[in-house]
Amino acid sequence: MSGESATRITPGNALRPEDVAERVAGGVQVGEDVGEYALRLGDDALILAQRLGWWISRAPELEEDVALGNIALDLLGHARSFLTYAGSAWGKTEDDLAYWRGESEFRSCFLVEQPNGDFGKTIARQLVFSIFQHELYSRLVDSADETIAAISAKALKEVDYHRDHAIQWTIRLGDGTEESKRRIQAGLESVWPYVAELFQDDELIERLGGVAAHPSEMRAPFDALMAQVLDEAGLELPDVQPAMTGGRGGKHSEHLGYILAEMQVIAREHPGATW
Amino acid sequence: MATSDQTAMGTSDKTPATEIGHTPEKAPWPLWEVFVRSSRGLSHVHAGSLHAPDAEMAVRNARDLYTRRNEGVSLWVVPASSIVASDPDAKGEFFESPKGKDYRHATYYKKSEGVKHL
C-alpha cells in the first residue's frame, strides 16, 4: 500500500485507484465472475463520467459547470478503481479496458448512455442514477469481496453528494417556472424507459452470492425515495413502458458507439502515450 | 456567461445549451460571499464569492468551488448584499486616526520602578 508515501495527499484512508493498482500488482487477482461484475460497476461510472464531462463550459452557470465536472471526476475515480480491479481477471490495465474494448465488450446500462439533452434531462438522469447507485454502494460496503467493499465505501460518500445535488435541482426545477417544470418532467419521461434495466437480477448476480448486491432488492427503496422527491417537486411519476435493453450482456443503444469514438480516439491514435 | 459562450462557439440553435441561454427572462443569480473554516479552533476566513439561486445551493456551490482540496471543515455563505462595507473614500477618517496615538499600544509604556517580574 502507498499509505506511507510522502506524495500521498488524500487524507485518511480513502482508497485511490493507485491503491487498487498496487493490490493488483501485489498479486491480488479476481476470478472472471467478479471481474465481470466489476466491469459493470466501472463501465456505468465511466460512461456517465464521459457524458457529464460534456457540460463543462456549457452549464447554465459557471458554478454548475464545476458541480457537474466534480461529479464526473468522482465517477471517473470509481471507474478507474473498478476497472483496475476487473482487469486483474484478464491481465489488463484500466486503460486497456477503457480505451481498447469495443462496443459489445462494454457492460454499461442504457441509462448512462442516454444523451445529455437539456439541463432538465441531465438532472433527471442524475436523479435516477444517483439514487440507484447510492442503494447499490450502500449494499456493496458489505460485499464479501473486500476490494469491492473498500472501493464502494470511498465512493458512497461521493454519491451521497451526487444524490443530494440531483434532488436539490429536481425540486428547484419542478417547483420553479412553468418552463423548468416542463423540462424536468420531459427529462424524466425520456429516461424512465431505462430504469427497469438497473434493477434486473441475472445469472451472474446469483453465482456471485455475497459479493454482489441484488438489483431487484433495491427497487423498493428507489421507488420510495423517488416518490418522495417527485412529490416535493410537484412532478409526476412517469407512466411509460420499459425499453428493450441489454447493456449487461454487451448490447447497447445507438449512442454508445459515438461516446466511445470520442473517448477512445486519442488513446488509439497514440498507443501507449503518456502525459 | 453561458450566452456569450454559445455565441462564440456558433452552435446551432438546436443544441439544448443554447435553448437555456435563450430563455428571455433569465436573471443572473445573486452573489454570495464564502467563508471557510480551515480547521477546528480557527475562525472562518473569507475565501471568495460565487453565484447561486438560493442559500442552500450557495452552500453546495461553495463546497464545490472552495473545498475541493481539503481546505475546510465548515462553510458559511452570506448574501453579498447583506454586507455593509466601509467607504473606500473615507480612509482618512476611518483608518488614519490611530496614527500618532502610540499610547494605545502596550509598548508605549515604560516599566515602572520597583515592579518585579514584568
Image (cartoon, coloured by chain):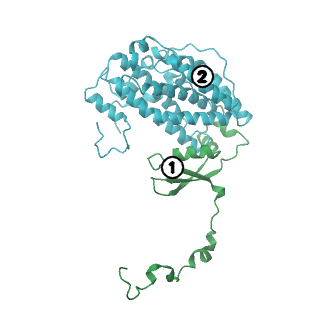
Chain colours: A cyan, B green
**Crowd tier of the residue under label 1, counting other residues whose Cα lies within 10 Å: few below 14, some 14–19, many 20 or above:** some
What's the mark number on residue A59?
Answer: none
Mark 2 belongs to chain: A
Quick check: do tags 1 and 2 share a chain? no
Tell me the residue at 37%/36% (across/down): A16
Tell me the residue at 64%/37% (across/down): B18
* Corner quadrant of residue A250: top left
> Which residue in the rendered view is the most extreme toward the top?
A203
Viewer-proximal residue among A224 and A191? A224
Tell me the residue at 38%/30% (across/down): A150
* Corner quadrant of residue B80: bottom right
Q: Three-letter amino acid code at disc 2?
A: Asp
Q: Relative to A40, does residue B64 appear above or below in the rendering?
A: below
> Which residue in the rendered view is the most extreme toward the bottom?
B113
Q: Three-letter amino acid code at disc 1?
A: Ser
- Going by the image, does A12 lie left or right of A135? left
Q: Relative to A98, does residue A202 appear above or below in the rendering?
A: above
Where residue B19 sits: x, y (%)?
67, 35
Q: Is residue B12 visible?
A: no
Q: Relative to B40, does residue A51 appear above or below in the rendering?
A: above
Q: Relative to B60, does residue B36 appear above or below in the rendering?
A: below
Where residue B71 sits: x, y (%)?
45, 50
Where residue A25 sits: x, y (%)?
27, 29
Separation of disc 1 and disc 2 at Cα?
33 Å
Q: Is residue A73 visible?
A: yes
Viewer-proximal residue among A52 and A205? A205
User: Residue at label 1?
Assistant: B74
Instruction: Give the quarter of the figure containing the C terminus of chain B.
Output: bottom left
What's the mark number on residue A223?
Answer: 2
